[in-house]
Image (tube, rainbow, N blue to C red):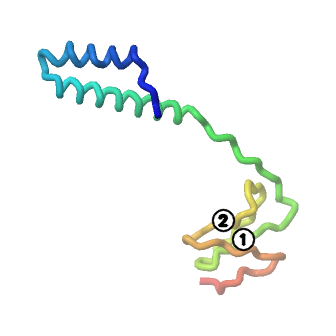
């Protein structure tokens, strides 16, 4: 169970009491809760925006023949630097690895 710290709780109660006299106690409590939520979301957003993910490790594969062909439209792609061994996608479909220097598996359009 999370323990409530006494000093911030007393500060919040004092603010509710001070702001509650002219504006109403419920309005003051809701306003302080909304302000705390907005500040928390803002700080967490900017904290996460500052964390940059590391660059993926790439491997030079230009000496090999990594050629992919899209089975939908026939687009041919030669990969020279790869970050992963997954096939790229085109036309919302995975591309097919083509061996050798042959023609694409589709007829020309």
Identified at 59% across, 34% down, the residue is 51
> Would you call the spot at circle 1 few (<14 residues within 10 Å), some (14-19), or many (20 or more)?
many
Q: Position of residue 7 (x, y in %)?
A: 39, 14
Q: Is residue 35 left or right of residue 84?
A: left
Identified at 64% across, 74% down, the residue is 70
- Tell me the distance, in whole angstroms, between the alpha carbons under discs 2 and 1: 8 Å
Q: Which residue is mark 1?
A: 68
Q: Is residue 6 left or right of residue 22?
A: right
Residue 104 image-quadrant placement: bottom right
Identified at 28% across, 18% down, the residue is 13
Q: Quadrant of the C terminus?
A: bottom right
Q: Which residue is mark 2?
A: 88
The local secondary structure at tag 2 comes to loop
Q: Is residue 45 left or right of residue 10?
A: right
Front residue (pair 101, 32)? 32
Q: Position of residue 39 (x, y in %)?
A: 38, 27
Which residue sits furthest bottom? 107
Front residue (pair 2, 90)? 2
Q: Position of residue 65 (x, y in %)?
A: 83, 67
Q: Which mark sits nearer the N-terminus, 2 or 1?
A: 1
The local secondary structure at tag 1 comes to strand
Asked if labels 1 and 2 touch by Cβ distance under 8 angstroms, the answer is yes
Q: Position of residue 88 (x, y in %)?
A: 66, 65
> Mark 2, mark 1: which one is toward the viewer?
2
State the count of labels.
2
Question: Where is 44 relative to 73, above or below?
Answer: above
Residue 19 image-quadrant placement: top left
Front residue (pair 84, 43)? 43
> Would you call the spot at circle 2 few (<14 residues within 10 Å), some (14-19), or many (20 or more)?
some
């Amino acid at each position: 169970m999370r323990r409530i710290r006494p000093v911030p709780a007393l500060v919040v109660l004092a603010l509710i009491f001070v702001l509650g006299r002219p504006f109403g106690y419920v309005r003051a409590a809701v306003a302080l809760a909304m302000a705390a939520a907005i500040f928390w979301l803002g700080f967490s957003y900017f904290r996460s925006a500052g964390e940059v993910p590391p660059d993926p490790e790439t491997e030079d594969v230009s000496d090999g023949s990594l050629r992919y062909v899209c089975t939908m439209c026939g687009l041919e792609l030669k990969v020279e630097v790869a970050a992963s061994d997954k096939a790229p996608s085109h036309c919302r479909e995975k591309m097919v690895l083509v061996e050798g220097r042959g023609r694409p598996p589709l007829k020309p359009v």
